[in-house]
Structure formats: C-alpha cells, structure tokens
Image (cartoon, rainbow, N blue to C red):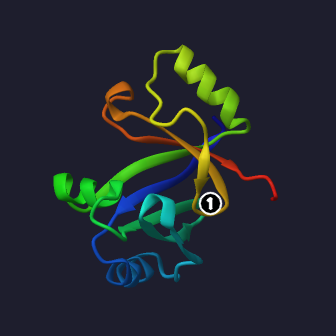
Amino acid sequence: MRKIEHLGIAVRDLEASNALFEKLLGTPAYKMEEVASEGVRTSFFKSGPNKIELLEATNPDSPIAKYLERKGEGIHHIAFDVEDIHAEMARLKAEGFILLNETPKRGADNKLVAFLHPKSSGGVLVELCQEAPAE
C-alpha cells in the first residue's frame, strides 16, 4: 500500500454535508457522482494532499443505509491506494484478512475497489483503491 487514498464519511444528507465541509475546508467539492451498483451518491473534497469522500445512501438496502441505521453518521472507511489491486488482495487474503469481494469492482472517482471485512482489520472497514484502466 502506497498511501491513504481517502477517508469515507457516511452522511444522511449529502447537500447539507457538502455545505458543512465546504465551510470547514474552505473549498467546494471537486466531484460528485452516483455509484448505482452500490446505492450511493458521493462527493469528494481535497484537503492538501488528502481526500475526503462523503457517502449518502440512495436506497434503504444499500450498505451505507445499513451503516447509518446501525452507527449513524461518521467515518465509514479508510481507503488505501495500491499499485496492483489483484496482487494486494491475494497478499492480504494469504495474511488471513477476510475480503468482502473476491474480485475488484468499479467504484467512485474512477477507481477499482475491494474491501476488507472489519472483523479481520481491527474493526475498521478498509478499502483498497487502484486507478481504473481506460475502457
């Protein structure tokens, strides 16, 4: 893993949270998008070299909606940038981590993503991110 790619924060109202983070960081979101396959709308902010992703559920069965029901708003995951997501997934699986998906999937911000189950990573949902190849 090369660096922290972003911190993901679950929110109930993306517009209200965008306004809050714009005030907090002094800059607007640089990107907003919907990932229909995950039932989520996202926005991204930059803070120096770091990124923050806000996540709002678009349907009541999505992982973010379920997270908000259980825990409320707050930090949802930490994402790490990886050079080769397939190799990193294999390495982590061999180390005993539990993968939530066996193959990477398309995520927000033009990334291929995979997740580690929090029960195998100290209670933290870990996302692996690699820049997606051009289609």
Residue that sits furthest to the right in the current view: 134
Q: Residue at x 64, y 29 (%)?
A: 88
Q: Identify which amino acid the numbered label 1 is placed on.
A: Pro
Residue 82 to residue 93: above or below = below
Q: Is residue 16 left or right of residue 102?
A: left
Q: Which residue is mark 1?
A: 49
Residue 5 to residue 72: above or below = above
Q: Residue at x 35, y 80 (%)?
A: 20
Q: Nearer the viewer, residue 70 or 26?
A: 70
Q: Residue at x 47, y 30 (%)?
A: 99
Residue 130, percent across and down?
68, 46
Q: Quadrant of residue 85?
A: top right
Q: Is residue 62 left or right of residue 68?
A: right
Helix, strand or loop for disc 1: loop
Q: Is residue 90 left or right of residue 44?
A: right
| Quadrant containing the C terminus in the rendered view | bottom right
Q: Nearer the viewer, residue 117 or 62?
A: 62
Residue 15, percent across and down?
37, 84
> How many numbered marks appear?
1
Residue 7 to residue 43: above or below = above
Q: Residue at x 36, y 38 (%)?
A: 124
Residue 72, percent across and down?
20, 60
Q: Nearer the viewer, residue 24 or 104?
A: 104
| Quadrant containing the N terminus in the rendered view | top right
Mark 1 crowdedness (10 Å alpha carbons): few <14, some 14-19, many ≥20? few
Q: Quadrant of residue 61?
A: bottom left
Residue 92, percent across and down?
55, 23
